Image: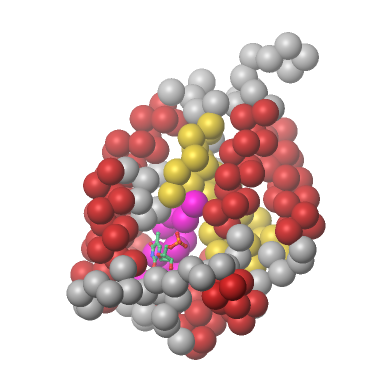
Amino acid sequence: MKGFFITFEGIEGSGKSSLARMSAEHLSSLGYSVVLTREPGGTPLGEMIRKLLLDPEGEPMTPLTELLLYFADRAEHIGKTILPSLKEGKVVICDRFSDSTIAYQGYGRGLDMETILELDRIAREGLTPDLTILLDLDVETGLGRNQAARKFDRFEAEDLEFHEKVRNGYREIARKSPERVRLVNASLPKEAVWDQVREVLESFVRSQTYRIDLPGNR
Ligand code: TMP
């Protein structure tokens, strides 16, 4: 029995976290055993790392320190939550994963991409998501939504140019991995975005051989 690993990605204010939660609820209602988690912060130690990384009042850190903290969070998360859950045949839905590091630290901060890819491969123990849903929308709309929701952390404080680089980085990732990454237009009203996400999820699970033994599922 094999679980699935599904990740949600996108810029600030893309609606990722709500859509990840709705997806977890939807797949649970279809009979899947689902673990909903996030990065940074999917473990108790990861929550501490998240505070260090995102606190706008926190000690400024070098871009390399930041990168290594994301990888420390990922290594802990992979070892303690993601791999054990997949081995139990569960569906793991993760709000952000490796593509965030490539988009933010690679395309956004401009750190060396080869170094990032190599360290990332080590941190995630070679595990790649089965499906990634990339919520795409323009940067002004995304940041505006977060301002309206009074969400503010160290990344929301970055300028528009930084967020544009992140968005374009994500689009580049989607272009390079079309078999894994599904791009969803997140600028539409909430219900319309959810309809697209649900459609992607349902066609993905239909395409998989692993099914939970439910009446009517054979
Ligand atoms: P969020 O989960 O509320 O979106 O906040 C996480 C922030 O951390 C977000 O601004 C993106 C950033 N981030 C990175 O820069 N690199 C990473 O590898 C991850 C997982 C997140």
What is the residue that sits farthest to the top in this orientation?
A: 215
Query: x%, y% of residue 217?
Result: 74, 17
How many marks are shown on the rendered structure? Answer: 0
Query: Is 193 located above or below residue 43 in the figure?
Result: below
Magenta stretch? 95-107
Residue 124 forms part of the magenta stretch: no
Lateral position of residue 54 relative to residue 140, left or right: left
Q: Residue at x 63, y 42 (%)?
A: 23
Q: Nearer the viewer, residue 55 or 26?
A: 55
Q: Residue at x 45, y 76 (%)?
A: 156
Q: Which colouring convention does the figure follow?
A: secondary structure
Q: Residue at x 24, y 47 (%)?
A: 45
Query: x%, y% of residue 193?
Result: 73, 57
Query: Is 123 located above or below residue 62 in the figure?
Result: above
Query: Is 130 located above or below residue 64 in the figure?
Result: above
- Choose top left, top right, bottom left or bottom right for residue 84: top left
Dominant SS of magenta comes to helix
- Choose top left, top right, bottom left or bottom right for residue 50: bottom left
Lateral position of residue 144 relative to residue 66, left or right: right
Query: x%, y% of residue 74?
Result: 32, 51
Q: Nearer the viewer, residue 104 or 144?
A: 144
Can residue 174 be seen in the rendering of this structure? Answer: no
